[in-house]
Amino acid sequence: MKYTTIPQTEIKISKICLGTMTWGNQNTQDEGFAQLDMAVEQGINFIDTAELYPVPATAETQGRTSTIIGNWLNERKNRDQLVLATKIAGPGDYTSHISTLGYSPEGIKTAVHKSLKRLQTDYIDLYQLHWPERHTNRFGIRDYQHRPDDPWTDNFHEVLLTLDEMIKSGKIRHIGISNESSWGTMRFLEESKTHRLPRIRTIQNSYSLLNRTFEGDLAEISVREKIGLLAYSPLAFGVLSGKYVNNTASENSRLKLFPRFSRYSSDQSTEATKKYLAIAEKFDISLPHMALAFVNSRPFVTANIIGATNLEQLKENISSIDVSLTNEILQAIGEVHAVIPNPAP
């Protein structure tokens, strides 16, 4: 395993982070335990979850993933060896069963306390805002369209004040954002600098061969302002495994179970995936290894969040850390990107 640090901290993390969003729905607790055990054996010490998980978000299943992790931590007695990240759910129709308080002081404090209880821990290493409260272009919306009727008010200061209280109380160590834009990222930085409030350390956004939109303004912000990208969906919901274009996906695969998750399933995405698969075959490398190794190699990526529904997938995904892409492969990837850029924003 290779290791890095959460920017501007002394927290050492594995470059491969274990994602957990299927546990409690597609995966049982026993399967989650097995994945955690394998990940730790392979050198992973960084685990990411969210109060929303598992997905799809439902009132019946909400919180199961964190509960599974908490049960495992309680059995293995290894909390001090791990770096644990979780997220508070943003507002939305599909999260009203979690909370209607948003990122208000009461909403944040309540969410932190519930996460600590489920995870059976006294502290969270990295606490993240899952998505912005305001209406903006997140989750596959390509272009920003302003909505004059958006009731959101600029509450960056209030959010940071509350998170500062949680840090001072010892309940969380550092903070991050997720599914955020360049403007939102810079507003958080401005607010923390002006008022000496906690600084954003990481940003968790989608990043893969099918979605390199982060390489716009956010990549420059990431490098210059030292905010590490925690790249999620590096295999684009499994599309970049090649199993859907090859018709080898199991009945338990995410897109067969939940076809509404169509962010990476457009005709352009499918065409790009076929081209990337051809590159992998030409250079005798698996498509998952190529896709994950590409993400691992980017200078603004602090950690690559992988997920799996079985141990075979997990083992292959973790082993991508030992794969280096040649200049020839990178050039071929660049040629596809030039023709079909970001088909799944």
Image (cartoon, helix red, strand yellow):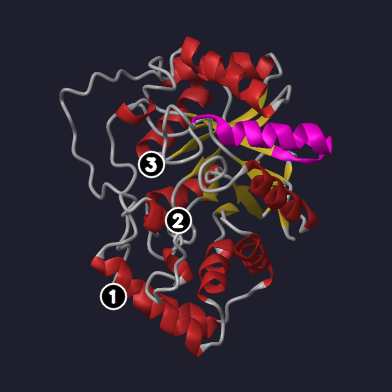
Farthest residue toward the front? 251
Give the quarter of the image for residue 127: top right
Say what amino acid the circle numbered 2 marks: Tyr
Which residue appears at 36% of the width and 37% of the height? 183
Which residue appears at 69% of the width and 70% of the height? 322
Residue position for label 2: 207
Q: Which mark is residue 28?
A: none
Question: Picture coordinates of residue 248 (x, y %)?
Answer: 45, 73
Kindly report the distance in space between the C-alpha atoms of the residues bearing marks 2 and 1.
18 Å
Q: Which mark is residue 339?
A: 1
Question: Picture coordinates of residue 45 (x, y %)?
Answer: 74, 47
Question: Picture coordinates of residue 117 (x, y %)?
Answer: 66, 21
Please give the range of residues in magenta.
62-83
Residue placed most toward the observer, 163 or 290: 290
Specify few, some or many for label 2: CA neighbours under 10 Å numbering under 14, 14-19, or 20 or more.
many
Magenta span contains residue 272:
no
Residue position for label 3: 182
Pointer 3 or 1: first along the chain: 3
Farthest residue toward the top? 106
Q: Quadrant of the C terminus?
A: bottom left
Specify few, some or many for label 3: CA neighbours under 10 Å numbering under 14, 14-19, or 20 or more.
some
Tell me the chief SS of the magenta region.
helix
Q: Quadrant of the N terminus?
A: bottom right
Q: Is residue 28 above or below residue 163?
A: below
Q: Helix, strand, or loop for circle 1? A: helix
Pointer 2 or 1: first along the chain: 2
